[in-house]
Image (tube, rainbow, N blue to C red):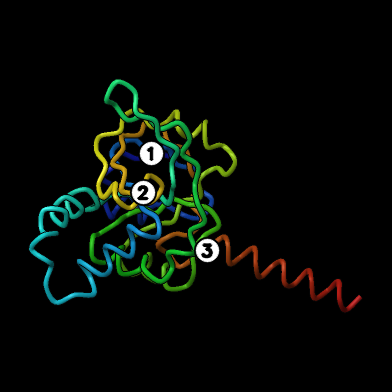
Amino acid sequence: MIELTIPISDEQIRALHVGDTVSLSGVMLTARDAAHKYMIENFIRTDQVPASEREMYEKLKADLDGGVIYHCGPIVKKEDGVWRFVAAGPTTSIREEVYEPEVIEHFNVKAVIGKGGMGPNTLKACQEFGAVYLQAVGGAASLIANAVVEVIDVYKLEFGVPEAFWKIRVENFPAVVTMDSHGRSLHEDVWVKSQEVFERLVAA
């Protein structure tokens, strides 16, 4: 198990390879469809950041520089004025393929956590800008929530609880490197091998 503290350095990312298991501690952000679309439209594919969003932009830049995005639509409960994660399982990552490469580049994101892997454009961005994709444990939402020790803030709650940016502090968050900064994707490897087996079965 490789222990990583967020923010993560480029050197640490380049030392990781597909198959490595990691334990993350530090501050990360959850972000799903609405959050990614918001970042792209307001901060990346635009000539100028809207004045009304400037403060938000500065917050995201600080949070994501060397940081981690978690594809997660959490179940969250507020008790005595304090937010608490009840369940925090990963959501399918491929939906963010149209956004993630640009987000990685623009904000210097070092790791993306989710399930199911991502496509060739994100893999290329991982190579070029030094990032990894981490597979979280599916079906263990309540267990993963135990790694969330604090909800620090929430941005854009108007998107809805699952789609808002949740700024969380985690300790010993477990994950596996399935796409690395050296151009390898375990998801692609499995697909290729599966196709080979399928073709042999069909030909038999």
Marks 1/2 in contact by CB < 8 Å: the verdict is: no
- Foreground: 37 or 186? 37
Q: Secondary structure at mark 2?
A: loop
Q: CA distance from mark 2 to mark 3?
A: 32 Å
The three-letter amino acid code for the residue at tag 3 is Ser
Q: Position of residue 35 (x, y in %)?
A: 32, 57
Residue under numbered circle 2: 160
Residue at 29% across, 20% down = 80
Residue pictured at 56% horizontal, 37% vertical: 140
Q: Which percent across, then down, holds residue 189?
A: 61, 65
Judged left or right of residue 173, residue 204 is right
Query: Which mark is drawn over residue 24?
Result: 1
Q: CA distance from mark 1 to mark 2?
A: 26 Å
Q: Residues within 10 Å of mark 1 (few under 14, many from 20)?
A: many
Where disc 1 sits, the SS reads strand
Quadrant in which the C terminus is drawn: bottom right
Residue 85 x/y as whole percent: 40, 32
What is the CA distance from the residue labelled 1 to the residue labelled 3? 20 Å
Coordinates of residue 60 in the picture (x, y in percent): 20, 53
Q: Which of the two discs, 2 and 3, labels the residue nearer the N terminus?
A: 2
User: Does any portion of residue 1 appear in the rendered image?
Assistant: no
> Residue at 45% across / 31% down in the picture?
86
